[in-house]
């Protein structure tokens, strides 16, 4: 094996088949062949490539979709995998389109250095699956609520008068328990539709809640420090892990991660006006996650509220303050994503409080916070190291 020449591979992946091409390091094509996309096909493809030499790198199209199984097999075999984008349209116009050609172009992209991205992280695929399923459930629930609201606008007067004043949760519960029987056939039909939509809303809510609980377990296991950061909930943490896992080559610096999440400042100056705005490019899901964290901290985080107050005194606009906050949060999130940050243990707080018969309300009144805030910190659902230290010292002295 040591005497064999080094080669590179390229793979064009599809749902049922994949085409593999093998090239020398000088770019000469040695062979190509089609295989099935199953466990046996993966190992046959690896044997085919290694039969022509020592495989240095393999470029694979769609490492997180059609090429996920082959990528896992290649990594298990100790072969480096590079994510390859599909050939550009100009190349296809010049050379045509075929599976053997696409496989060869994937290998040439690795040789030329045009493809350098590491494959998508398979560890986040479980989080991605639950996150996407929950997002679709939430969208469907919103659509159901919008339909309920629209139907009530044009409903017969008795139905509209009875239900229009109720808020979302109470409205859904009331419609779920209604009995659509009336002398008016129109009112009966409308109530039947509303009851069906209310049942759908409750079903989708239970689905979304169940998946959120599972997502919370997975993201906490994947990155406990990220989940414990202030303002980072299960959904936000999942989105950030998906963004990072889908773009591992974009985590090399603060600037690249900020650009990835659309939090990089961009000049927006004109004439005597000299200012910046946020980039509108990048991963919009990651940008939305940073935006939600910023809003939560602006409302509930003492240090952030003090920072916002200082910036307001300097006549900064809300948009400018939010831009600076998102850039700072991107810096913090990158550190949490790329380093193993130890999470302080809070499990001793609740037993210590209960041992002295101190209620949550008493603690909340002393520190001027909501009882739920204390409860979340005690259960490890929220991280605030400075507050926890003060709380622990207060408990010791109580």
Image (cartoon, rainbow, N blue to C red):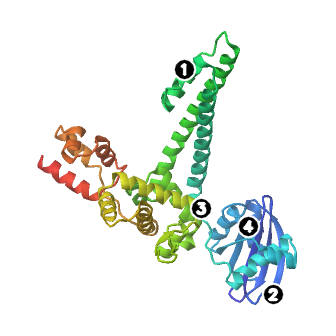
Q: Quadrant of the N terminus?
A: bottom right
Q: CA distance from mark 1 to mark 2?
A: 78 Å
Residue 5 placed where, x, y %? Answer: 73, 88
Specify the label residue 161 is tagged with: 1
Q: Residues within 10 Å of mark 1 (few under 14, many from 20)?
A: few
Q: Which residue is mark 4?
A: 43
Q: Is residue 104 left or right of residue 189?
A: right
Q: Nearer the viewer, mark 2 or mark 4?
A: 2
Q: Nearer the viewer, mark 4 or mark 1?
A: 1
- Badge 2 or badge 4: first in the primary sequence: 2
Name which residue lies at 31% across and 46% down: 373
Q: Which residue is mark 3?
A: 122
Please indicate, yes or no, whether residue 251 appears anywhere in the rendered image: no
Name which residue lies at 63% across and 78% down: 116
Q: Nearer the viewer, mark 4 or mark 3?
A: 3
- Front residue of 81 and 43: 81
């Amino acid at each position: 094996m040591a005497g064999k020449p080094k080669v590179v591979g390229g793979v064009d992946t599809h749902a049922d088949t994949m085409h593999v091409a093998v090239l020398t390091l000088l770019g000469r094509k040695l062979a190509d062949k089609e295989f099935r996309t199953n466990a046996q096909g993966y190992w046959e493809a690896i044997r085919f490539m290694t039969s022509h030499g020592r495989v240095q790198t393999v470029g694979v199209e769609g490492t997180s979709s059609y090429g996920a199984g082959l990528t896992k097999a290649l990594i298990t075999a100790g072969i480096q995998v590079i994510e390859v984008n599909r050939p550009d349209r100009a190349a296809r116009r010049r050379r045509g389109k075929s599976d053997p050609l696409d496989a060869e172009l994937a290998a040439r992209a690795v040789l030329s250095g045009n493809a350098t991205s590491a494959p998508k992280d398979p560890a986040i695929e479980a989080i991605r699956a639950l996150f996407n399923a929950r997002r679709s459930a939430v969208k469907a629930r919103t659509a159901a609520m919008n339909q309920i609201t629209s139907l009530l606008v044009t409903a017969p007067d008795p139905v509209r008068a009875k239900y229009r004043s109720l808020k979302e949760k109470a409205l859904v519960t009331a419609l779920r328990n209604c009995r659509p029987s009336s002398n008016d056939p129109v009112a009966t039909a409308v109530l039947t539709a509303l009851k069906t939509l209310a049942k759908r809303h409750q079903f989708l809510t239970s689905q979304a809640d169940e998946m959120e609980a599972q997502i919370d377990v997975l993201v906490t296991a994947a990155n406990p420090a990220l989940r414990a950061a202030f303002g980072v909930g299960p959904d936000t943490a999942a989105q950030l892990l998906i963004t990072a896992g889908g773009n591992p080559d974009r985590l090399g610096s603060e600037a690249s991660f900020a650009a990835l999440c659309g939090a990089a400042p961009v000049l927006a100056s004109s004439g005597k006006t000299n200012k910046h705005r946020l980039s509108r490019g990048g991963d919009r899901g990651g940008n939305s996650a940073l935006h939600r964290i910023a809003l939560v901290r602006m409302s509930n985080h003492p240090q952030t509220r003090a920072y916002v107050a200082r910036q307001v005194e300097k006549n900064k606009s809300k948009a400018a303050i939010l831009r600076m906050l998102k850039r700072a949060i991107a810096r913090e999130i990158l550190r949490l994503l790329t380093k193993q940050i130890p999470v302080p243990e809070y499990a001793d707080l609740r037993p210590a409080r209960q041992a002295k018969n101190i209620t949550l309300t008493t603690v909340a009144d002393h520190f001027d916070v909501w009882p739920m805030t204390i409860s979340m910190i005690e259960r490890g659902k929220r991280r605030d190291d400075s507050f926890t230290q003060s709380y622990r010292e207060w408990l010791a002295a109580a």
